[in-house]
Every structure is written in structure tokens, then in C-alpha cells.
Image (cartoon, rainbow, N blue to C red):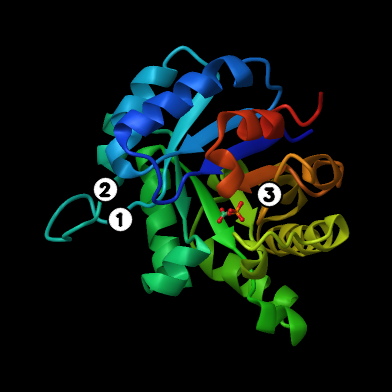
Amino acid sequence: MRKAIIAGNWKMNKTPAQAAELIEGLIPLCKGANCDVVICPPFVDLCKAVKMTDGTNIHVGAQNVHWAQSGAFTGEVSADMLTSIGVEYVIIGHSERRQYFGETDETVNLRAKAAIAAGLIPIICVGESLAQRESGETDALVTMQINKGLDGIAAADVKKLVIAYEPIWAIGTGKTATDEQANETIGVIRGAVEKLYGHDVSDAVRIQYGGSMKPSNVKGLMAQNEIDGGLIGGASLKAEDFAQLVNYDK
Ligand code: PGA
């Protein structure tokens, strides 16, 4: 049985003071969660987030990582920098990174490898645009994103990482994929992993759904057999909402 994992992607929200306030609210509310709970604040909040969540069931992730160990890469942060302050997870290849910052499947792959080498758990994002869904390209696209994103990553590492299926048309739009749509495409993604690594690995890898997941739709999505959790944007910014998500099974 795969353990569910619910992660909050705060995106470019919350100053350190605001982050502290949110985390203070989250700690008691998330305490009894049966799933793995992760929050991914902006870089400037990470130190504070790690310190505040020490000894709690809340884990901390970053929203991006560079593949080089150090050097002349203005504006980037290395995997060792993240692990050195106690960060455990990192989101890689979010559609906003792909859309606005030129992220490609190749750079996703480089970032994922660097994250794994440093001991971070990558949350690798894949997903199609509305035009791609409407023209029937979804399955081929997510399969290609998986093939390229996981290229050269060892089976043992794939078992431990997390994949997030996020249809771009459902992100921040209030439109959610139906439970069945999300389940079906996650099944396709799991099938792509199986083709590359075999059943043992595809059965172990955790695949989240992301895109307007909220308290009102979490139960239906999490009841699907392929869906192992959520990557949550908007609803991760309010303690009460995020707490309802991580406690979806109560
Ligand atoms: P949303 O964002 O929950 O606000 O749709 C999800 C994401 O982009 O990870």
C-alpha cells in the first residue's frame, strides 16, 4: 500500500512573518494526519519553516533546485544548500516553471538527478494544457514527460520519488479534473513508469493529483485507486483548508 502524500505549493506567497503565522496554525491542525504532510514555501521562508516544524509531522520542501553543485548561476539554489538547512523535498518542473521560465523535460531531468544525488525527494510535475487535452494528446504527452524526466534515474530512486499529475487547465482556475479523468491519466503515468522500470517500481511510486484540489473535492479524488495524494496551490495558503485536505480520510 502506498502512503498518501499531500504537499502544499505556496508558490510566490508569504513573507517569513506570514509563513510563521501559517505554520503556527498548521502544526496543531495537521498533527493527526495519516498521510505524509509537506509544505513548500518560497526559498526565503525555508530556514524558518524547517526550524518551526522540527519535531512535528510537517516536512519541508523547496519549489525548485539547480543541477550544478555551485557556480555562476545567478538566482539559482543548489541541492546541497537545501539539504544543509534541513529541506527534504523539492518540486521540480512545475508547469509555471515550464511556461514562464523555460523549464524543459531535459532540465527537469537534470534537476531531479541532482536532487536525488543530494538526498532530496523530488516531486516531479507533469501535465497537459487544455489544447493538448482537447486534441487527444494527453496520454502521449505525459508519457513523454515521464520518459524524459526519469531518464537515467535508477529504479530504486524512482520508487522513492513523487510524481504530480497537474493538468495545466485545472491549476488555479477552479476547474478540477473529474475524479475519473485524474485517475485515468495517473493510470497512464503509472503505466509509463511500469514500462520503464517494471511493476515493482510502478506499484511503489506515489503519484499525486494537482489542480484546484480543495476541501470540497479532496475525498472524491483521494478515493480513486491511482491517486496517492495532492499537490495543492491556493488551498495550501490557509491553515484550515490545508488541514482539511491532509485530514481527508476523517
Ligand atoms: P492550485 O495549484 O491548487 O492553486 O490549482 C496547484 C499547483 O499549481 O500545484
Mark 3 vs ligand 1: CB below 8 Å: no
Mark 1 and mark 3 in contact? Answer it, CB < 8 Å: no
Q: CA distance from mark 1 to mark 2?
A: 5 Å
* Label 1 element class: loop
Mark 2 is surrounded, within 10 Å at the Cα level, by few (under 14), some (14 to 19) or many (20 or more) other residues, namely: many
Identify the residue shown where x is 64% and y is 63%: 173
From this viewpoint, is residue 170 visible? yes
Mark 1 and mark 2 in contact? Answer it, CB < 8 Å: yes
Q: CA distance from mark 1 to mark 3?
A: 23 Å
Mark 3 and mark 2 in contact? Answer it, CB < 8 Å: no
Identify the residue shown where x is 67% and y is 48%: 208
Q: Amino acid at mark 2?
A: Ser
Mark 3 is surrounded, within 10 Å at the Cα level, by few (under 14), some (14 to 19) or many (20 or more) other residues, namely: many
Residue 78's disc number: 2
Q: Amino acid at mark 3?
A: Ile
Residue placed furthest toward the left = 72
* Label 3 element class: strand
Residue 66's disc number: 1
Q: Position of residue 228 (x, y in %)?
A: 73, 42
Q: Earlier in the sequence, mark 1 or mark 3?
A: 1
Q: Position of residue 152 (x, y in %)?
A: 48, 61
Q: CA distance from mark 3 to mark 2?
A: 25 Å
Question: The N terminus lies in which quarter of the figure?
Answer: top right
Which residue was labeled with disc 3?
Answer: 207
From this viewpoint, is residue 158 visible? no
